[in-house]
Image (cartoon, rainbow, N blue to C red):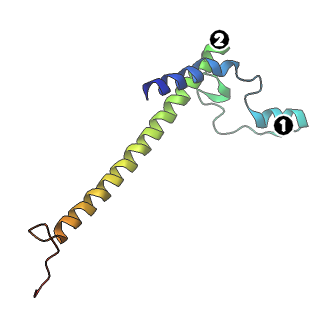
Amino acid sequence: MAVGILVCLFLAGVVSYYASSHPDGLEFVAKEQGFAGSAAPHASDGSPFAGYATRGIDDARVSGGVAGLVGAALVFVIAGGLFVAVRRRDQATSDAATSDAEVSVGADGGRPERDGA
């Protein structure tokens, strides 16, 4: 798993700079088709990582690499949190099913006890 994370961070931080000269496909098509000028600013335009870059870092290669690393880290944190939450829920469901099965089995571990039998 650690190797996979390191490869992902390498791709996000280093290789992503060389991936494409047109990183945003929608923006590229809008320029190509002539309607890019009609785009309005969006809420995240002022964010520290807007435009595949890191605000405050002048070197485009480093700026894009930092943005890629932060994006990959956020994905790991969110995906890891979801994984832990689902795993805990599944474990709680499994524990509840196990305890229900133990209660319904007789004291000798055989067939369930019945009233009046």
Q: Which of 38/4 is in front?
A: 4
Displayed quadrant of residue 96: bottom left
Quick check: 117 above or below 27? Answer: below
Q: Position of residue 86 (x, y in %)?
A: 40, 50
Residue found at x 70% / y 22%: 19
At which x and y percent is residue 46? 63, 30
Q: Which residue is mark 2?
A: 59
Residue furthest out toward the right:
34
Q: Amino acid at mark 2?
A: Asp
Position of the N terminus, as image quadrant, is: top left
In the rendered structure, which amino acid carries the disc numbered 1?
Answer: Ala
Query: For mark 1, does the 10 Å Cα neighbourhood hold few (<14), some (14 to 19), or many (20 or more) residues?
Result: some
Residue under the image location 17 percent in, 68 percent down? 103
- Dot 2: what SS? loop
Quadrant that contains the C terminus: bottom left
Estimate the spatial distance between the alpha carbons at disc 1 and disc 2, rounded to whole Å.
27 Å
**Is 35 situated left or right of 65 in this image?**
right
> Mark 2, residues whose alpha carbon is within 10 Å: few (<14), some, or many (≥20)?
few
Mark 1 or 2, nearer chain start: 1
Farthest residue, direction bottom: 116
* Secondary structure of the residue carrying numbered label 1: helix
Q: Which mark is residue 30?
A: 1
> Which residue is more in the foreground, 70 or 14?
14
Along the viewing direction, whichever of 65 and 14 lies nearer the viewer? 14
